[in-house]
Amino acid sequence: MAQKSKKSKSKRMSLKQKYKIVKKVKEHHKKKAKEDKKTGRKQKAPKDPGIPSAWPFKADLLKELDWEKQRAVAVDKQRKEERKRARVEAETKEADAEMTEQQANDSASMGDVAQKAEYKQQAYESNKRLKTSLQAVSSDRDSSRRAFYKEFMKVVDAADVVVEVLDARDPLSCRCLDVERLVRRSGADKKVILLLNKIDLVPREVAEAWLKYLREELPTVAFKCSTQKQASNLGQRHLPKAQSSDSALQGSECLGANTLLQLLKNYTRNSDTKTAITVGVVGFPNVGKSSLLNSLKRTRVAQVGNTPGVTRAVQEVVLDKHLRLLDSPGIVFANSDSTGADAAADALRNCVKIEKLEDAVLPVSEIVKRCPAKQLMAIYKVPTFDDTDQFLQHIALVRGKLKKGGTVDVQAAAKVVLQDWSDGRIPFYTMPPQRKAQEGHAAAEVVTHWASDFDADQVFGDERTAVIDGLPSLEESSNHFQTQSNGPATASLEDMQQGAVLPSSSDDEEQAQDMDDTELPEPKAPKPTSDQTAELYKASGQFNPHAARATKKKAKKQQKRASGDAYDFAEAFGAKAAV
């Protein structure tokens, strides 16, 4: 039998085994550190061994360390005393200076003191007025209607077809007839299409009634925007005639895109002037204009949100070589200084940001008047109530909207109800009004005019099978209830057009009047300036370069007119004709 070698074994190992050991050690230390951190234990620092007892000069070294420690304490104490002495000297000098100034003020006359106080009072009042006006300008800048009106006019001027987006729950309150007249006045060839968005929020009979009512005047398309969250590849549902069902409207895909695109392509083929058209999308805030662009493009090209004012400028989206879409910001066409019922109607149209409402209880009182109490009790799971305040108190207690001390926050509860109203959690709908005989005859003439341009009969026949038949009926949708409409929207477009340019200064007006007297070409309108700049120039002692420039030009023209060096166009052209 072979005997084992008595020589020592080699401690060499492969690199694989070596690195494996290093890795295991690291993992062990990491795990131990994590456990210490979890339990709160800290690793103790290595203890200082101190000076060995066998050190021959240990006593001398200890004395030296003690002396250095005492010296450091003395230096620190001296620095503190120097800082304290410097602070006392500075306070003494400041007190002496105040005393000297007080003596000088006492020696001044009472007239100078009164004049200085009056000047300070005037400066304070001027600064206060300026600050108040600047705050008003900055707060109104978020909802500036003039800027939105300019963007709206850009879309109307550039578009061949204008799509007015309406909310299917209350289309009459979202439709503005003044805007449609403005589109027709801006060009005889411009067409208007009504788009009934959020069609999945109303029963089938209601959608059919509104489509019949609106198609007596203009082509109207039933639509449901895509609610998918991804950035691209948004779905479009194209149902065959035999497979229309309720599941079509329960998903998040878009419905009705095929009908709208077919109408636009038919108009492009029938129009002899253009092979490509521009489509402008207009409407009230939060009716789904940007979502319409995303659904047609099948990509999130426009930012969307459930609050008004998300879109603040015109955005162009090229759909294909025949269609170009223009998205416009939502405009509140109603009067800007509306109060009472008009302000409540604007809030119910979701034209105003809910968080910026000063009194959110007034719109909620309109909701309570229009909605059945049993429906509201079932939606919010609250007991019976007698008035709006009691209803909001119940909601505040259920939703936990409480102030400091446990009192209910009525305003916060009202904003919750308004948000549910705009988001569709309160399932309401409105019915179209009855037409008069004369209106029906005029509407029939309009239908025959636009039906041939869009080939609407075949397109709308396919739409009924693909979209309308999939809506639930009134019997199936028992939660829906009918409410009163907010009424048609009104627009003072002339006032908005006049307010699109800020009022010019007096110097600019004098300059324009002077140029009119000299029979020169009509001057261009002054460039609009901000309200903040105008307020700053009104302040006393503030130099206004625009006014100075206008005064200089006016003096130069007067001097030129007085010297008789003005060029006579009639004389020059008469002499030229004689030659």
Image: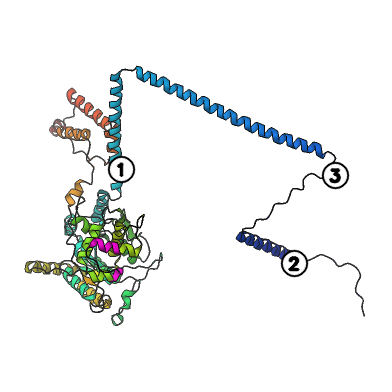
Task: Please name the residue that numbered disc 1 is placed on.
Answer: 135
Helix, strand or loop at mark 2: helix
Q: Amino acid at mark 3?
A: Ala
Q: Amino acid at mark 1?
A: Gln
Judge whether residue 214 can be spotted in this image. yes
Examine the rendering and report whether any part of residue 320 can be seen: no
Q: Residues within 10 Å of mark 1 (few under 14, many from 20)?
A: few
Element under label 1? helix
Q: Where residue 400 appears, x then y in whole percent?
A: 36, 62
- Residue 132: image quadrant is top left
Q: Earlier in the sequence, mark 2 or mark 3?
A: 2
Residue 212 lies in the magenta stretch: no
Q: Is residue 484 left or right of residue 233?
A: left
Specify the segment rendered in magenta. Answer: 378-394
Q: Is residue 379 magenta?
A: yes
Can you say which quadrant of the picture contains the N terminus? bottom right
Q: Which residue carries the number 2 mark?
A: 17
- If the image is split into quadrants, where does the C terminus sit? top left
Total labels drawn = 3
Q: Which mark is residue 54?
A: 3
Point out residue 357 in the picture as x, y percentages from the top left corner. Answer: 28, 54
Q: State how far apart marks 3 and 1 are (Cα).
A: 80 Å
Residue 416 screen position, x and y as percent: 31, 61
Disc number lying in front (2 or 3): 3
- Neighbor class of circle 3 (other Cα within 10 Å; few <14, some 14-19, many 20+) is few
Q: Could you tell which of marks 3 and 1 lies nearer the N-terminus? A: 3
Q: Are marks 3 and 1 in contact (CB under 8 Å)?
A: no
Counting other residues with Cα less than 10 Å from the Cα at mark 2, is it few (<14), some (14-19), or many (20 or more)? few
What separation in Å lies between label 2 and label 3 (alpha carbons)? Answer: 45 Å
Q: Nearer the viewer, residue 300 or 144?
A: 144
